Amino acid sequence: MIHRVTIVLAEYCPHCVPFSLSNAKKIAHDLDVPLRILNIEYSAQELLADKLVKEHGDWSEDYLIPQVFVEYADGRVIHLLTGFSEAVSATESAWQALFSSSFYKNLVHGQAETHRNTLKDIVEDYLTFSSQCRRHCTKSTSFIELWSNPTKMVKAYVCPDGYVSRVIAFSTHPVVTWFRNFIVNQGVGEILNDRDLRLASRHGWELETDISHTFKHISPTGVIYEVYWTTYPKTDEERRRGLFLCSSPEQREGCKRLFVQNINSSRERCPQCSTSDI
């Protein structure tokens, strides 16, 4: 993972300030890392600049500036650009070539994937979809997190009234039994039918962009597992009950636990939280 961009410059150098400095700031912004400026007009910074250029850049006793580097957390350093001694326009052209190159695009893309390669990131980026409420209304739903740790997370599609149309457990290994216990511990086991728990395997290659290599970062099998729970009522009594979340998606209040009530109820908070408000 890249942890810093460094530019070696001098304020008197027309190749450095302002446009090379501005472009270095753009690189830092694109990579979402800090920018270190080493100004060779200051002795302490010059010593650091000399060492960096000598070890990783275009070194000579009177080396060209600006020089730009990306530094990785593991100690690796990549030299990106050296200014020209000819017209300033030559250095400007070098910057333009850098930003339009596939090398730079891959650098930014790789950094973005490094920053977002947790289970939560993958779910948010690739396994979250627009949806509408079912049975209860036709409003758009929010996908709200109920619980998570590095290898498992539970999220629910919830409408603005708090009705839950679907609950999904995501994990790096099948967790049907664990998810069933999670639902029971929420206090809504009364409406749980094992036939309504359905397991699905998600592979990086089946998404719009093949991210198989990202899946392999977090899953030993390269697979993300989902366990779906959608209630399918069979009787009139079952149809009268609905699953709700103690949290209005618009207000973000409540304890974020699941509870059961009449499907036409307007209460947004569970009985425990409602009682505590009295």
Image (tube, rainbow, N blue to C red):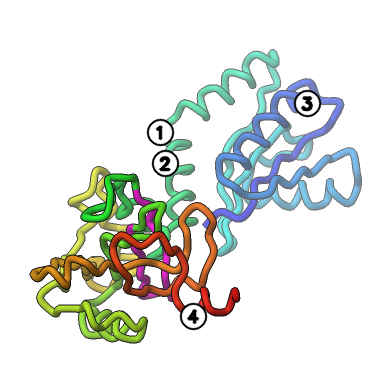
The mark nearer the N terminus, 1 or 4, is: 1
Residue at coordinates 37% horizontally, 73% vertically from top-left? 258
Say above or below: 274 vs 78. below
Q: Please give the residue where the numbered disc 1 appears in the rendered image.
A: 102
Q: Main secondary structure of the magenta part?
A: strand
Q: Which residues are magenta?
A: 141-157
| Kind of residue indicated by mark 1 | Ser
Q: Please give the residue where the numbered disc 3 appears in the rendered image.
A: 17
Q: In 3D space, how far apart are the residues under numbered discs 3 and 4 (Cα atoms)?
A: 62 Å
As drawn, is 83 to the left or to the right of 141?
Answer: right
Select label 1 or label 4 by which is in front: 4
Say above or below: 105 vs 122. above
Q: In 3D space, how far apart are the residues under numbered discs 3 and 1 (Cα atoms)?
A: 26 Å
Whether tag 3 and tag 1 are in contact, CB under 8 A, the answer is no
> Any magenta on residue 142?
yes
Using a 10 Å C-alpha cutoff, classify the residue at mark 2 as few (fewer than 14 neighbours), some (14 to 19) or many (20 or more).
few
SS category of the residue bearing label 2: helix
Pick the front one: 99 or 245: 245
Numbered circle sitting on residue 272: 4
As drawn, is 78 to the left or to the right of 212?
Answer: right
SS category of the residue bearing label 3: loop
> Any magenta on residue 238?
no
| Kind of residue indicated by mark 4 | Gln
Residue 190 location in percent, x, y? 23, 82
Residue 183: quarter of image: bottom left
Residue 118: quarter of image: bottom left
Whether tag 2 and tag 1 are in contact, CB under 8 A, the answer is yes
Q: Please give the residue where the numbered disc 2 appears in the rendered image.
A: 106
Q: In 3D space, how far apart are the residues under numbered discs 1 and 4 (Cα atoms)?
A: 56 Å
